[in-house]
Image (cartoon, rainbow, N blue to C red):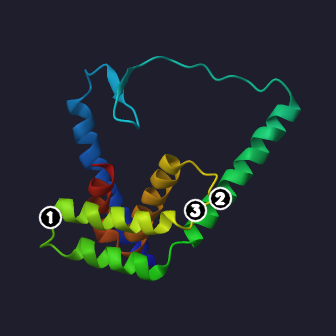
Amino acid sequence: DSCCSNSFQTELQALGCELSVQDHLWEDYEDELQTDGSRASRFHVQRIEADSESEEDLIQTLARQLAQIGDSMERSIPPRLVDHLVMQFMNRNLLEEDRRGHLATAVEQLMQTCPADLEQEKATLVLTMLLAKKVADHTPSLLRDVFRTTVN
């Protein structure tokens, strides 16, 4: 497992270097890309302190519940689905568009297992990120490919 861990770390560092280079190209750009694809001007938000211990307790409880939901969603991902995605990402004959299609199909399958009260857009985002993580954990050499496919 140490070998896989080292391989994953190597791929993660390489991706970090790629992203750092791209980041320098956008240094002078004033806006940040938002999750919905729009751009918003930068502004500084000061941290708002919790007014009371009960508010802090509420935040802690909410955080625990969100972590449990995330863990549950991650456990709902069948290993065979991850294996199938790994095979698709390893197929160098597939176009990027085809990889995106396979990832989208996998997410759609998993959406059937999501809690009904979870917003579809948020569930889609979480499941996409979880699948990307699982593919990269399974085969670290695919980290950059799955990252590019996921964010594009």
| Residue 3 visible in this rendered orientation of the protein | no
x then y, percent, for residue 54: 87, 34
Q: Is residue 133 left or right of residue 98?
A: right
| Spatial CA span between label 1 and label 3 | 29 Å
Mark with earlier residue (3, 2): 2
Mark with earlier residue (1, 2): 2
Q: Secondary structure at mark 1?
A: loop
View extreme (left): residue: 93
The numbered mark at residue 114 is 3
| Residue 96 visible in this rendered orientation of the protein | yes
Q: Secondary structure at mark 3?
A: loop
Instruction: Give amino acid for label 1.
Output: Leu
Please give the residue where the numbered disc 1 appears in the rendered image. 95
The residue carrying pointer 1 sits among few (fewer than 14), some (14 to 19) or many (20 or more) residues within 10 Å by Cα, namely few
| Spatial CA span between label 1 and label 2 | 33 Å
Q: At 23% from the left edge and 75% from the top edge, which residue is drawn?
A: 90
x then y, percent, for residue 136: 38, 67
x then y, percent, for residue 58: 81, 39
Please give the residue where the numbered disc 2 appears in the rendered image. 69
Q: Nearer the viewer, mark 1 or mark 3?
A: 3
x then y, percent, for residue 139: 35, 74
View extreme (bottom): residue: 80
Instruction: Give amino acid for label 3.
Output: Cys
Q: At 38% from the left edge and 63% from the top edge, which residue is drawn?
A: 9
